[in-house]
Image: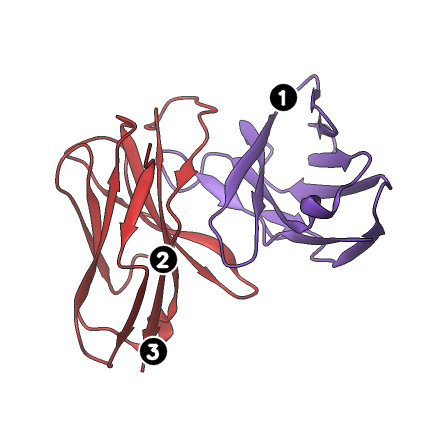
């Protein structure tokens, strides 16, 4: 009963390198999200995918791209990593998203700790 | 005014005591409210949703005051295992689809 699985759990990059953070959920959820969490800042939404085939920008999308590969998988890509992107990245999913009223909670993966040198 | 505000604490509380903390939100159109719990270096986990009439789950009670735009969390008979950061989460009309906005969290330390 995995829930939301993120890989890798830890990564160190050099400035300018690229990498993709992977996320998969096995709960048949429609909506998936990527957040970053920095000390003193709380969680901030980077991108989300309300349903398979759609993606939208969140609060802090600059420097990132996403791909909703299928219903299960939602990846986050850093094309040219910068030290300001050092953070803990969380992927989340929820059963029902979209522009409708919903109090469906989000379920989180256990995070990717990314350091950019 | 920040969208979701919480007292960062830390709240240092003896085991067995009752503790309460509030969260205020700025968007009066906010629709759904949650409390999440986050342990150190772990992912946030849903503690409870907050309903208009207030709701209780064991030792935890959540209240919503729409007129004053705040939600509260009360923990009775606190346990050492309650030590964590409690995140107030509000769903409004921002950020498109789900519009979840997270507070920065209130750090709670239960002392033996």
Q: Is residue B29 visible?
A: no
- Which part of the image, by quadrant, shows the N terminus of chain A? top left
Mark 2 and mark 1, same subunit?
no
* Residue A76 picture quarter: bottom left
The mark found on residue A25 in the picture is none
Q: Is residue B41 above or below residue A69?
A: below
Residue pictured at 74% horizontal, 29% vertical: B59
Task: From the image, state the color of chain A.
Answer: red
Identify the residue at image location x=81%, y=34%.
B76
Q: Which residue is mark 1?
A: B51
Under circle 2, the secondary element is loop
Q: Quadrant of the C terminus of chain A?
A: bottom left
Please identify the quarter of the rendering in which residue B56 is found.
Answer: top right
Residue under pointer 3: A83
Q: Is residue B76 left or right of residue B66?
A: right
Do the residues marked 3 and 1 share a common chain? no
Few, some or many residues within 10 Å of mark 1 (<14, 14–19, 20+): some
Q: Is residue B48 left or right of residue B54?
A: left
For marks 2 and 3 on the same chain, the one whose residue lies earlier in the sequence: 2
Return the chain for callout 1.
B
Q: Residue A108: horizontal and vertical position, in percent?
A: 40, 42
Q: CA distance from mark 2 to mark 1?
A: 29 Å
The foreground one among B112 and A17 is B112
Mark 3 vs mark 1, CA separation in Å = 41 Å
Question: Label 1's element?
Answer: loop
């Amino acid at each position: 009963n995995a829930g939301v699985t993120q890989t890798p759990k830890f990564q160190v990059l050099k400035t300018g390198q690229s990498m993709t953070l992977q996320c998969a959920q096995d709960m048949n959820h429609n909506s998936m999200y990527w957040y970053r969490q920095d000390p003193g800042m709380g969680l901030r939404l980077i991108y989300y995918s309300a349903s398979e085939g759609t993606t939208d920008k969140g609060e802090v999308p600059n420097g990132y791209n996403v791909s909703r590969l299928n219903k299960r998988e939602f990846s986050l890509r850093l094309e040219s990593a910068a030290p300001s992107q050092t953070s803990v990245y969380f992927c989340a999913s929820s059963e029902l998203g979209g522009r409708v009223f919903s109090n469906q909670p989000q379920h989180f993966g256990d995070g990717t700790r990314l350091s950019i040198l | 005014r920040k969208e979701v505000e919480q007292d960062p604490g830390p709240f240092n509380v003896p085991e067995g005591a009752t503790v309460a903390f509030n969260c205020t939100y700025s968007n009066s159109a906010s629709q759904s409210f949650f409390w999440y719990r986050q342990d150190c270096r772990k992912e946030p986990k849903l503690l409870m949703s907050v309903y208009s009439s207030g709701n209780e789950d064991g030792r935890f009670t959540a209240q919503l005051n729409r007129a004053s735009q705040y939600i509260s969390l009360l923990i009775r008979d606190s346990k050492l295992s309650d030590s964590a950061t409690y995140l107030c989460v509000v769903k409004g009309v921002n950020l498109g689809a789900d519009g979840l906005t997270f507070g920065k969290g209130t750090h709670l330390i239960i002392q033996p």
